[in-house]
Amino acid sequence: MFINCKLATLTLVLTLCGQVHSGGIIGGREAKPHSRPYMVLLKTKMPDDPDDGHCGGFLLNEDFVMTAAHCQAESYRVLLGLHSYYDKNGTQELSVVQSFPHKDYDAKHVKNDIMLLKLSSKAKFNEHVKPIPLAEEDNGHLPNLCMVSGWGLTGKDNYMSDILLEVNVTLTNNSHCAGRKLYCSEGPTGPGEGDSGGPLVCEDGKAYGLVSCSKKPDLDGLIVYKYTKIPDHKEWIDTIMQHKGKF
C-alpha cells in the first residue's frame, strides 16, 4: 500500500516462497477505523533480536488468535482493537501463554502455514474487538469478493504502516495452489511484508484463509500471493480450540 505512514519500530516478518519481491500491499487504502474488529497486530520477540517482529492475525474467540506458523517466536504480544499504532486508546494488549503451530508445518516448502495462539487472559469484546467466523468447508468454488488487511510495508522504504490498510484481491485457479491446501491471488495488488498471518475475508464476512507467502514465478510474470486454506484445516482448528489447548 502506498500511503506515506512511516513506522520503523518493528521488524517485518515475512516468508517468501520462491523469488523475493519488494513492496507492501499495493493499491490499497486505509480501512475505515475499527471496521475490522477481529484484526490483530502481533508483536513477536526472538532471543537474538533486540527488535520486535511484526505479523498480522485475527481473533477467533475470547481465548484464541490465528496467525501464520512462520510467525513463531519466543514470546508474543497481541494488540486488539487497534487502528492507528500511534493511538492506542482503548486497545487491549495481551500476552500469549501457549502457541500451537500446525503439527505438519513445513517451513522449507511453506506447507500447513497456520498457528493458533492461546491468550493469557480473555479478550473483552466490545465495538472495536470482536471475533470473526471461519469458513466451514470448501465446496470447490472459489469465493468472489475477498479482502486482506494489515499494517505491513507501505512501499519500498521498508516502513510499516501506522494505520490499518486493506486491499481487494481476486482468487484464481492457479497451478501453484491447486491441491496444496492453498488459495491464490495474483497481480499487482495483494499483501506484503508484515501482513503475514492476516485473514483473507470474503463476501460473506468469514475468514477463508490467512496470508502465508508470495512468489514471482518468472521475471516478467505477476506476483502470486498464497493463503493457507482454513476449511482444509478446520478439524485441526476445532480440536485445539475445543480442548482449550489441553490434551
Image: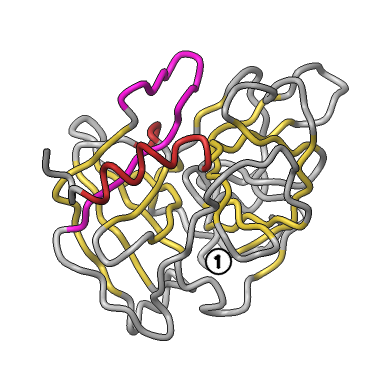
Amino acid found under the numbered disc labelled 1: Leu
Check residue 36 for magenta coloring.
no
Disc 1 target residue: 164
Q: Locate residue 103 relative to residue 193 in the image: left or right.
A: left
Q: Locate residue 232 relative to residue 147 in the image: left or right.
A: left
Hey, which quadrant is residue 182 in on the image? top right
The N terminus sits in image quarter: bottom right
Hey, which quadrant is residue 41 in on the image? bottom left
Q: Locate residue 61 relative to residue 132 in the image: left or right.
A: left
Asked if 210 appears above or below 151 in the picture, the reply is: above
Q: Position of residue 195 (x, y in %)?
A: 53, 48
Question: In percent of the image, x 61 and y 57: which residue is there?
Answer: 201
User: Front-most of 101 and 155?
Assistant: 101
The C terminus sits in image quarter: top left
Query: Which range is magenta?
Result: 103-119
The majority secondary structure of the magenta stretch comes to loop
Q: Position of residue 13 (x, y in %)?
A: 44, 38
Hey, which quadrant is residue 63 in on the image? bottom left
Asked if 121 appears above or below 125 in the picture, the reply is: above
Question: In percent of the image, x 41 and y 67: which residue is there?
Answer: 131
Question: In percent of the image, x 82 and y 39: which residue is there?
Answer: 187
Question: In percent of the image, x 55 and y 42: which residue is there?
Answer: 211
User: Front-most of 158 and 182?
Assistant: 182
Q: Position of residue 3 (x, y in %)?
A: 68, 63
